[in-house]
Amino acid sequence: MADLIEALSGRRARRAFDPRTVPAETQELLWRAVSVAPSHGNVQSARLLVAQSKGARDKLVAALSEGNRNWAPAAPLLVALGSIPDHEHADSYGEERALWSFHAGIAAGNLMTQATALGLVAHPMAGFDEAAVRDVFGAPSELRVLVVFAIGYPGPVESLPEDLQRREQREQRRQPLDRLVAVDSWGAGNSVPARDPSRGGRRSGKLER
């Protein structure tokens, strides 16, 4: 079990990529990791959109936020992950719940963990035009795109602009367990955010590390 937590904690959302192609058999392992993600009622609503051709890649890059366009095109693989809410159960125990996004989150976690185990970087990006991403693939409006991944082997930090080099080498910080876990009752520490919500993050258009 210790090996698993080491693999999970070793994941980083790096931006520097090696130009090596990710072999087809390695890509299939990533897709299989998504396919085995659990879902309520086994609805399996998650979908992957892989930009393989130059035309599809160029259009997907154009759909990204400006900040992400500064580094993401160097990744050999660009993949969007979404979910189809209409495939989900309408309610759960009488309550309306957006389980489709929860299921997509589990699938994304599987993909990132498998990528890390294979020596890959799978950097999740939240900064993109959702409708434009759907248009790249001719996907229906029913598909909700939640994240676009830049995937590839890690490359030299020196390949990045100076500002991104500094961010790439920044120490990773996690919430201490006494803030994360509430036992029997909610404590004041459980309300403390990991980051100040009033500060940036949106400009970078990415899910934080």
Image (spheres, grey):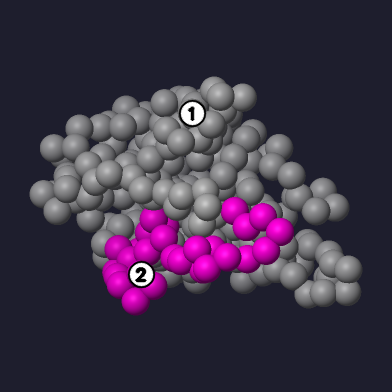
Q: Position of residue 27 (x, y in %)?
A: 52, 31
What secondary structure characterizes most of the magenta part?
loop
Q: Position of residue 161 (x, y in %)?
A: 13, 49
Does 121 sit above or below residue 209? above
In this image, 73 relative to 113: left or right?
A: left
Which element carries disc 1, helix, strand or loop? Answer: helix
Q: How many numbered marks appear? A: 2
Q: Which residues are magenta?
A: 181-208
- On residue 52, the disc is none
Q: At label 2, which amino acid type do we have?
A: Asp
- On residue 6, the disc is 1
Q: At label 1, which amino acid type do we have?
A: Glu
At x 44% / y 65%, what residue is drawn?
A: 193
At x 22% / y 42%, what residue is drawn?
A: 169
CB under 8 Å between discs 1 and 2: no
Q: Residues within 10 Å of mark 2 (few under 14, many from 20)?
A: few
In whole angstroms, how far apart are the C-alphas of marks 1 and 2? 28 Å
Q: Residues within 10 Å of mark 1 (few under 14, many from 20)?
A: few
At x 61% / y 24%, what residue is drawn?
A: 1
- On residue 196, the disc is 2
Query: Does any portion of residue 50 appear in the rendered image?
Result: yes
Instruction: Look at the image and say whether residue 117 sits in the magenta stretch.
Output: no
Q: Position of residue 208 (x, y in %)?
A: 39, 55
Q: Position of residue 123 (x, y in %)?
A: 40, 46
